[in-house]
Every structure is written in C-alpha cells, then in structure tokens.
Image (cartoon, rainbow, N blue to C red):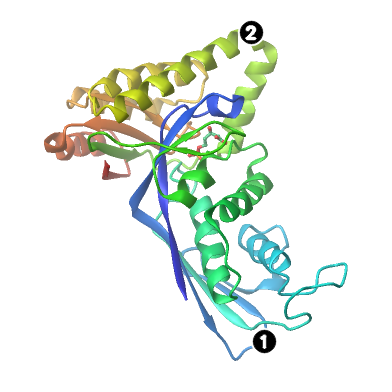
Amino acid sequence: MKASAPGKIILFGEHAVVYGRPALAVPVTQVHAEVEIAGSDSTGIWIHTPDINLHAELNSLPSDHPIAAVVHNFLFLSRTFASPSGRGARGEGRLPHFNIRITSTIPVASGLGSGAAVTVALVRALSSYLNYPMSDEEINAFAYDIEKLHHGTPSGIDNTVVTYAKPVYFVKNQPIELFKVGAPFTIVIGDTGIPAPTKESVADVRKHWEADKEMWESVFDEVGKISSEARDSIERGKTRELGELMNQNHALLQEMTVSSPELDRLVEAARKAGAIGSKLSGGGRGGNMIALVEAENAGEVSSALVSAGAKRTLITTVS
Ligand code: PMV
C-alpha cells in the first residue's frame, strides 16, 4: 500500500496569515513524501525512514516523535486498538504487525512543507492499509493537530495545501478556498541551504507584535491586501502583476525581521537575472526564496541563484 503527498510553497502572506490575513500557497509536485506499508512477520509496527537513518519499532520511540505521534493518533482515531474507555469499535486488542517505509525528496526545515507532507502521506497510507477511509477534510484536520504538536501556533496553511494538492487561498479558521490559475506561470525556488525552524521566526514576529500591536496590525493588513490582489491577478491570468506584489511582500517580510542576508542576496540575484519579482517563502531566516520568471528565463535565473549561493534550485510551473 503506497501513498504520497507533494511539497508546497507559500506565494504570498506568510506570517501575516498567523494573524488572520489571507495567504496563497501552491503544491510543488516535483518533490514529494512517499509512504509504503506492507505486512510483516515480526511483532509490532516498524518504522523505516532511511533518509534520516531511523529504523525503530513504534513503541521504542517517544510518543511525541513526529512520526510515532501520527501512528498513535491514527490507531486511536480508527480504534484499531481499544480506546482508553475500553470501547474500541474495531479489532479491539488486535495488534497489527506491519512495516512503514517513509521516503521524501522534500528538503527538511526549508519551507517546502516536508513535515506536513510526511504526515499526510502516512495518514493516507494507514487509512488504506487499515481500511479506515478518511475524507480530505478529515486528513487535513488530523494533520493540523500534528502541526500544532510541533509548531506551537501554526496557521494551518501547510497541511491544507499539502492535503488538497491544489492552489489554496487560506484564511485561518475559515472554510478552505481553492483558487483557479488563469494562466500558468513559472517559479524558480532557491534554497539557502540554511535550516530555519519556523517556530522561532513565528515566535519572534509575535514578540514584535506584542510590543506594538497597532503598528504590526497595519503591516499585516498591507500583506493581506497584497495576497488578495495577487489572487485576483492569478485568476485573471495577469501573472506579470505578481512580480511587483512579490517585491512588496518581501519588503514587508524584511520589516518583520524574518529575512536574512542570504535570502536577500538570492532575492536580489534573481531580480538582476531578469526575474519579474522575488521574495522569501515560508518562515524565513533561511530556507527558500521564490522568483517569478518567464519560462524561457528560468534556467538563467536558476544559474544566477546558484552563483549567489543557493544550495539547490527547483523550477516549478503553477497551473
Ligand atoms: O516555513 P513554512 O513554509 O512552514 O511556512 C510557515 C508559514 C508561517 O506563516 C510563517 C507560519 C504559519 O503557521 O502559517
């Protein structure tokens, strides 16, 4: 039984989205997490994640381990084991034995949604293997609970775009809105190679906000306006308009102190190489930046990013 989930990038609105402003995110299908589950003769549930050299039986891992937590929560939800009340609906006390193999081509802690993708792929695989069907809505809610466990106060945008694998206009605590792409456009993603925990940049932005709520609310308002305008431009197929909006969004992220010299260098290099616009993407401080380019210019921008220090680049078409 196999399942997979794509990576993602945030096009507009990171950080402000935590404060209720809209953000836009799209799936990146060139990279993905894949989970394979197969029956096993050895006792227990074995987790194999060769990328991080993890080979362990479920119960030997701490219960809040990101992968173990997904399996425990799933087994509890599906009542594969008896619930604490002793009223498990299915298979009470029956210990399933199987192997879970997790692989991913999504760089970790770089803003490409690797954690959310592993969770979603794992839930999908468990759901099929243990014959407990789940809707996208249920998978999304499940993945959000796991994100909360590890990221404190996530907006929920990562799990949403990764679950639905479609462009998402996201407002925290609002029904999910998918949006149409009027004309396909090309994005070059540049990775600084610097792992940057989103939790820290989110916490720092919160400190600034707490010190001067009025000022930061107005910055977040500006970002929210950019996200709404960007959605409108994308739906009308006026993708050139996105360039300037990206540049403006990047300046506001710099104000929020979540850019870094390395990110700024890549953002500048992309523009110099002819990108229509560029900005950091995700939590910031490290991780990725994105550049909007003409398809025929993607190679040139990608080379310029590598020369400016990008550890890797990826070209993706949003359609
Ligand atoms: O670093 P990423 O790509 O997981 O992006 C996080 C986006 C933030 O807006 C910074 C946080 C959030 O929970 O929305």
Q: Quadrant of residue 189?
A: top left
Viewer-proximal residue among 84 and 308: 84
Extreme residue in the left direction: 296
Quadrant location of the C terminus in the rendered image: top left
Q: Position of residue 79 (x, y in %)?
A: 73, 70
Q: Quadrant of residue 209?
A: top right
Residue visible at 73% across and 66% down in the picture: 76
Residue visible at 69% across and 13% down in the picture: 211
Closer to the camera: disc 1 or disc 2?
2
What's the mark number on residue 43? Answer: 1
Which residue has dot 2 on it? 214
Residue 54 shows up from this direction: no
Residue type at numbered disc 2: Glu
The alpha-carbon separation of the residues under discs 1 and 2 comes to 58 Å
Q: Position of residue 258 (x, y in %)?
A: 50, 25
Q: Position of residue 264 (x, y in %)?
A: 36, 24
Q: Quadrant of residue 178?
A: top left
Viewer-proximal residue among 270 and 121: 121
Label 2: few (<14), some or many (≥20) within 10 Å?
A: few
Viewer-proximal residue among 175 and 276: 175
First-in-chain label (1 vs 2): 1
Q: Secondary structure at mark 1?
A: loop
